[in-house]
Amino acid sequence: MAKSFSFNGDGINFQSGDSVAAALIRSGYRALRRTRFAGQERSIFCGIGQCFDCLVIIDGKANQRACLVPAKEGMQVEFQEGAGKA
Amino acid sequence: MSARSSGDSLDSAASVNGVAIIGAGPAGLSALHQLLTSSQSLKIEMIDSQVRIGGQYWRHQEGSEFPAIDFDPRKNSAQSHEITWHLASTVWQIEKLEGGFRIHLASNVGDVTSSVEVEKIIIATGASERTLPFKNWTAPGVMSAGALQSLAKEYQVIPGKRICIVGSGVFAMPVAKSIKETAKKMGTEVEVTIIEAQSMTRWWRNSLAFLLNPSKIFEACGFLIFMKVNGVKRISKRMVRGVKIEAGGIVGLNVARVRSDLRPERGVEFLPGDLVATSFGFIPDMTLASILGLERRELSGDVVVVVNANQRTSIDGIWAAGEITGIGGHELAITEGAIAARDLLQRRSPLLKWRRVRQRLFTRGLTKIYPVSNRWVESLDDADIVCRCEEVTAGEIKESAHQLGADSARTAKLFTRAGMGLCQGRICQRNVKEIIDFVRSDGKSASDPNRETVRPIGGVVTLGGLSD
């Protein structure tokens, strides 16, 4: 059985060694968050943890870099609005 | 800087109470390789911000090796040495102690902190990719060429069907190759176009450096043949003006003909595509070098660490190697890392030093082929975002120079917040500096390489992590 985590409730299959961002992009997702001021959609940009553009909420924790965090079974990943605070 | 090796081997002399290598890329691993040959038992702390070793250059899949160093440091049992790996760890501060240093580490999420004490440091923090801003470069589906390569090579993800790689420099070629190879493995079709700002004919300028580095001739020919055989299209003397978005998706990009100083000419052409990757060379990652207060200088527009012939920095007990001493690629980094570690062990390296001369000649030549002059600023509209984190536009940055007297990236940051966001200017600082230099009537830089990049904390740390 394929391993999976959820993104806004959708099941995302991932392969071992995947980052959260890699698994999401393989599944056809692009936008991962919206910016604080202009509300622009953003996604992975530098891919190596330097630009902080691929921020998502993981298991309730905001501002996690999707390109750095390894995908784990059962993880709950959410699209981040602004600074990620409710 | 007193920098002479005594010629005696350290192996019989006083012991070293710990060496930290910061950065496990080509330079850092090469330094480690040398240290492991010491007959004296060493305590080595290997630190890297990534989950895997290999740096940006060897972003291989798990389990692969490092051919150019010819050893796998994880398999090397090194009975006589004690190696501690601190991966997924960011160094956020380094304290000077009596006869050594205390290195403060934070996990990538910033809430787990620790520290190690060492006597000597080899700093090899590498470089990050340089990108230039253009219209809609913040849209999902526009990424750095490095991100594209990492997706293709490391994760076997091909994020588009018609991929355009825009920019300047040799990096686009290995990226295009990775995409084509991965697509072939997966049995999918992908169209790849490289849009290069400079003309191919500029290569003759580097002919001497090629003759001294014949392996580079084969490497270049290999790429050209690969691109021909695999149908990678190549367009020269064009630069991206903006990405076109329709119904929420990328449909292509507008490019304009540019001169060698990147000044755009009239008129734009449209190229279809659904994913845009961009790359304009590399910028040394000077965050830790500036926290340490290492002496810095400017080299072809980059701020780099000043080192002597043995890779020693201005601070006793700290060596620097690789991209932070001047952008030069992985081969030069390997050579410099080896020289640094050998000097630490009080060994001489005459042959490696000759190799370094040769390799530096080649890479300095590349910067002549692919110069990035600040005339690229002319391609920018005032509404285009420059600082992605704080969403600051080109117009706001220009205004800070015109109206408020900003004369450097540092002063522009104070007025506009450009460079004050989460990435701490890693993406935009250089571009902000060049916009300011360009719009100031004297066109000159007021930046001081020993001030411009200083930041008090070198990574993300939570307050909870700090209080531990």
Image (tube, coloured by chain):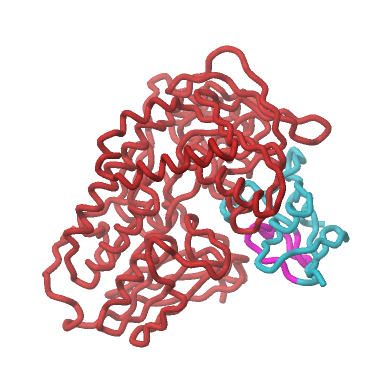
Q: Which chain is cyan?
A: A
Please provide percent x and percent y for residue B286. 41, 52
Horizontally, is B443 left or right of B265 in the view? Answer: left
Residue B179 image position (x, y, % from top left): 61, 47
Residue drawn at x 72%, y 65% as measured from the top left = A15
Name the residue rendered at 12%, 74% in the picture.
Answer: B8
Q: Quadrant of residue B210?
A: top left
Seen from the viewer's position, the closer of residues A14 and B376 is A14
Chain B, colour shown: red
Residue B44 appears at what percent x and percent y? 37, 77
Q: Eyeballing the image, is A44 above or below B92? A: above
Q: From the viewer's side, name the closer residue of B172 and A46.
A: B172
Q: Is residue A45 magenta?
A: no
**Residue shown at the point (54%, 40%) measured from the top left:** B428
The image shows residue A41 at horizontal and vertical percentages of 75, 42
Q: Residue at x 51, y 46 (%)?
A: B174
Residue A60 highlighted magenta (yes or no): yes
Residue range (magenta)? A57-72
